[in-house]
Image: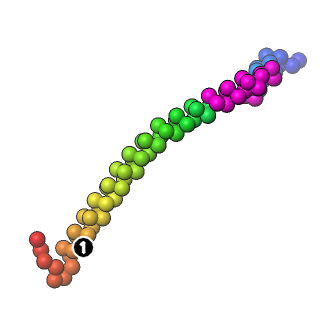
Amino acid sequence: MEPVDLIRRVKEIEQEAYGEPGMSATQEGTAAVDLSKRLKDLRQGNDGSSQRALEEWRKRKMERARQRAIEKDGMMPGAKTP
């Protein structure tokens, strides 16, 4: 006895994953363009967030470096205290 329903469902999933055999080149091209556009839009949205996060990190890093420099100057022998 064969699991007919399971075999049928596997074939459906394969068709969804690899495209239907009857799909025309135009439909495949349209799908590819649509996917490309969606990926580009996604990257652009992430680029803005990434850029802001990078800028915030840079600011925090510079502030910590400035604080360390102030502390270092205050600990040096012979350094003037403000």
Q: Residue 6: within the magenta?
A: no
Q: Secondary structure at mark 1?
A: helix
Residue sitting at the far front: 26
Q: Inspect the image, locate mark 1, and give the three-letter code of the amino acid beneath it.
A: Lys
Please report the residue visible at 61 percent of the width from the left and 34 percent of the height from the top: 36
Of residue 30 and residue 70, the one placed in the foreground of this image is: 30
- What residue is drawn where x is 57% and y is 35%? 39
- Left or right, 39 with respect to 11, comes to left
Pinpoint residue 73: horizontal percent, then vertical percent: 21, 74
Position in image of residue 67 (x %, y %): 25, 64
Q: Main secondary structure of the magenta part?
A: helix
Left or right of 4? Residue 57 is left
Q: Which residues are magenta?
A: 17-34
79 lies above or below 53: below
Q: Residue at x 19, y 82 (%)?
A: 77
> Circle 1: is it few (<14), some (14-19), or many (20+) Cα within 10 Å?
few
Q: Is residue 70 above or below residue 80?
A: above
> In the image, is 54 to the left or to the right of 81?
right
Residue 49, image x, y percentages: 42, 42
Q: Is residue 73 visible?
A: yes
Say which quarter of the image contains residue 29: top right
Quadrant in which the C terminus is drawn: bottom left
Q: What residue is rendered at 31% in x and 55% in y?
A: 60
Magenta stretch holds residue 27 = yes
For disc 1, the marked residue is 72
x and y percentages locating residue 43 in the rendered image: 52, 39
Q: What residue occupies the far left of the structure in this picture?
A: 82
> As drawn, which residue projects farthest toward the right?
1
User: Taking the image as drawn, is residue 6 in sight?
Assistant: no
